[in-house]
Image (cartoon, rainbow, N blue to C red):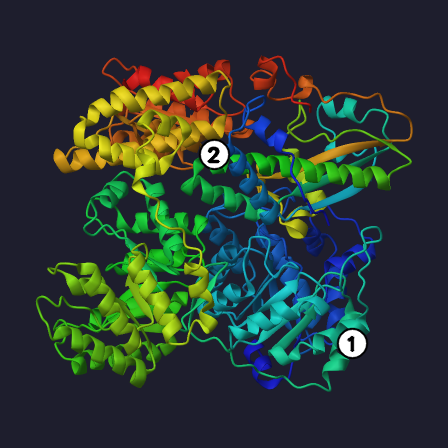
Amino acid sequence: MDFKGFLNDREFVLLDGAMGTLIQKSGVKYNSVPETLNISNPELITSFHKAYIEAGADIVYSNTFGANAYKLKESGYSVDEIIYAAITNAKNAVSGTSSLVALDIGPIGQLLEPAGSLSFDEAYEYFKEQILAGKEADVIVFETMTDLYELKAAVLAAKENSDKPIIATMTFERNGRTFTGVSPASAAVTLTGLGVDAVGVNCSLGPNELEPVVSEISKYTNLPIVIKANAGLPDPNSNEYDIMPDDFAKCVSSLLKYGVKIIGGCCGTTPEYISKIKETLKKERYQPQKKSVDTTVCSASTVVEINGPRIIGERINPTGKKLFKHALVDNNIDYILTQALSQVGGGAEILDVNVGHPEIDEKKMMVRVLKAIQSVCDAPLQIDSTKPDVLDAGLRYYNGKPIVNSVNGEEKSLSEVLPLVKKYGASVVGLTLDENGIPKTAEGRFEIAKSIVERAEAIGIDRNDVYIDCLTLTVSAEQDACRETLKALHRVKTELGCKTCLGVSNISFGLPNRELVNRTFLTMALEEGLDLPIINPNVESMTGAVCAYRVLSGIDKNSTDFINKYNDAAPAVSESKTSEIDIFTAVYSGLKNEGASITQKLLESTDAMQIVNEMLIPALDKVGDDFEKNKIFLPQLIQSANTAQECFEVIKKHISVTSGSPVSKGKIILATVKGDIHDIGKNIVKVLLDNYGYTVVDLGRDVDPQLIVDTAVEQNIKMIGLSALMTTTLKSMEETIKLVRERKELQNPDGTSKCVVFVGGAVLTKEYAMKIGADYYCKDAKESVDTAKLVLG
Amino acid sequence: MITLDKLNRKEAVRYLGGAGIKLNYRMDSLMDECEDEILKKASPKFLYIEKDLPFSEIMQGEDIKSHLEGCEKAVLMCATLGAEIDKLIRISQISDMARAVVLDSFASVAIEQVCCKVDEMLAEKYDEYYMTFRFSPGYGDYPIELQKDFLKLLDAPRKIGLTTNDNYLLLPSKSVTAVLGLSKTQIERRKRGCAVCNMRDKCQFRRNGEHCGF
């Protein structure tokens, strides 16, 4: 019988206990990693498996927890050799019994991006190698995972290289989160979507402390739940665990009410624990649980339940936005991140992400932007593109369960987009249009909605994961269309039982006082059952309308959220206060808002360049001077720089309105070199350069030398700044400089370099900088600005 | 379990190059907010193991030999503030760089305080021994490559989520690994001086004739 047979036929499925504990107790010595024992002492490992089978284990985990290429590097064995031997040992042990062998896979041992520097694709390759090596196993197990992103790479590697069932378990801390901040709910939602066969928790704590975690998981999945807990906590001196087999089994059975079906033991457990569990479970029944939360999207840390209106922020989208388009072309990811954070601050709970622009590679940019947003923002995201390959890439590299925007009733769209939604376990927005355009009537749109839902369900997408968009048309062009949209929305909500979404602001094109029209339409749509308004959350009246609606419709119980939001809202800052200080003082004291409004006023009477050259730059110079003389310290220097930046923004806007060409003193590439992820110093330099009017192309951290050189060539950039914090990453700096010097396009006809390279970082010295071929060494951000002035003027 | 209830502000200001500067009200409240935030988000964890000397796996270079000279045992330790702190600093770098540098500096102060608490705990546990100060991979000629071995010996990735990347950067980044020597006989008190410091050639403190106190 296979694993699925076990799930169907058996009341409970028993796993084994700890392998490491038995190895430790046996006192056997091994070289570098315990997995080498599979080869050096196969009898011992086989005997441990046998002991667990005799104790009642239906599945034994192969001794391959750390058998990945990273951890085996110095073991003298390949992944293939170790895993092959391990599976053979386990197969020998189960032979003649009904028990199955699971290929056991633990974390790689390196932190993934964004916190670490291992990429998603590298992680995928590590797992793929293990899965191919263990193809003789009956089940694939991923356990002790703390990073949902790593686990997603693992599950995809398994799904794409094997047809074996998958058990996925993570390990949680006492605060109910993993080390990387993953919540049990996010784990359950994401893993269920990715199509694993059982989900749960292992290691972590003793079974007595796991109730909160297990109960949360059970709310978000219908899958059988796994627990493989530690035997309590280890004593720091003796390393003995404190929960005995009897109590362990009792604790475990108290968790059965959450739908636990697959049970074993982790650190500190032995065959005795497993036989105790087996004995205790004889009297118990499996109690399958239906999940109580149906409609969800999530990031790794945050689940948003769609159980009332939730705002989707619309501003990460270049359509009609000049600055945004510039940001995309210049690779200015920080600009996009600022938009993300400000929308969340405004009240968005989900963010739409659209980076479609003819001058860039949309697919690459989508992946880059999604990763960057997820590194600073917990809100779930909506991947917005008309191109299936962009959606595919976005879905692959997203951490959590996203929304796809969108599919429509056209055959081509249905057949290309829905399989992606299914594969990656996402939700999807269904637009009610097809080959013939947007139906005029509510009836027509409802029919398309229905066919989208049917098609989704036919390939296994739950209708709870389809959000229908009945499409907003411009009321000034077609006045009746508004009614039809709302009628269709109402029918979709009540007859199909689907959640609905709607972009709102289209309604008011061509009318005066658009905000009023938008808000009124939003309120009408909410009353018809709109769940996901796609709006600009930073327009207070729109966000406010949603908050008020939540009160009036009884969703915001006791008006708690509303009161929290509005009770101590600060009154608007009065204008008069700001006019009392001048721009020099504003910049010198780092008063951001004041700086911007003073600049605005000044522009009415003063030439823009005069403000820059006679007021802003001298103020910044004074700040820089005082910093060098230790009169002010780093945070003040930065605040002044930020204030100046606000002033520059106002001036830039003014100039682009009046003359169309933005002011820039020249472009500079900044990057923290390959392998290094300490980039705070580089970011400080960026703030300062920005403020002196240079255009910074920030390539981020852990940057491939090739990307730096290519960018310099593509954008014709003459100045490159590199940072490295560690002695170990200085070699990447050297390589990067070498590559810059070698590139033909970056050389003058006489072979000298066109590019000026300046470097900085904690462990660098001037001598070393010169040795590796840099043109300038800058000891701090201020010196970087001085260097830029020298080189670019 | 280690909890922090206060962070050394003077030290944080010093890291930011503000020693001797009178902070204005706005800077003062920025410091307050950042201290609170670090205390709230930090989740300090540590591990240690005791090894009898000589313990060849960690002996590389001359400096560690002189550090552990005369010691019978060594304690390997590691500590981290956890991944939330990295995330906090990352986010603030987008929204407010000035805040980011203050948070970063308080986080450095916090991990040092965690280590000091571990020191105290160890001193109590090994009260029949004299104890050296903490010596970390990367000090003097002690190879940074040993980070990986330290973490493996301590089982740190699994137990407290502390890892290194291929370039031996600790992740989460506000983390420490170190070795302390234990001796039954009095150890000649060595100052962790500039001699073993990587920053000696470019140290701001040294340039101004000061000492970082380390």
Residue identified by numbered label 2: A680
Give the label, 2 or 1, closer to the camera: 2
Q: Few, some or many C-alpha atoms within 10 Å of disc 1 (few <14, some 14-19, many ≥20)?
A: some
Identified at 58% across, 67% down, the residue is A137
Front residue of A505/A382: it is: A505
Q: Pointer 2 indicates a residue of which chain?
A: A
**In front here: A82 or A20?**
A20
Q: Secondary structure at mark 1?
A: helix
State the image coordinates of residue A426 (x, y, percent, origin top left): 39, 67
The residue closer to the viewer here, A632 or A19, is A632
Q: Are marks 2 and 1 in contact (CB under 8 Å)?
A: no
Q: Which residue is mark 1?
A: A276
Furthest toward the left, the residue is: A477
Q: Amino acid at mark 2?
A: Ile
- Give x and y (percent) for residue A517: 19, 65
When the figure is inspected, residue A272 is found, relative to residue A640, above or below; the finding is below
A82 relative to A681 in the view: left or right: right
Amino acid type, residue under disc 1 in the picture: Lys
Do marks 2 and 1 share a chain?
yes
Q: Secondary structure at mark 2?
A: helix
Q: CA distance from mark 2 to mark 1?
A: 54 Å
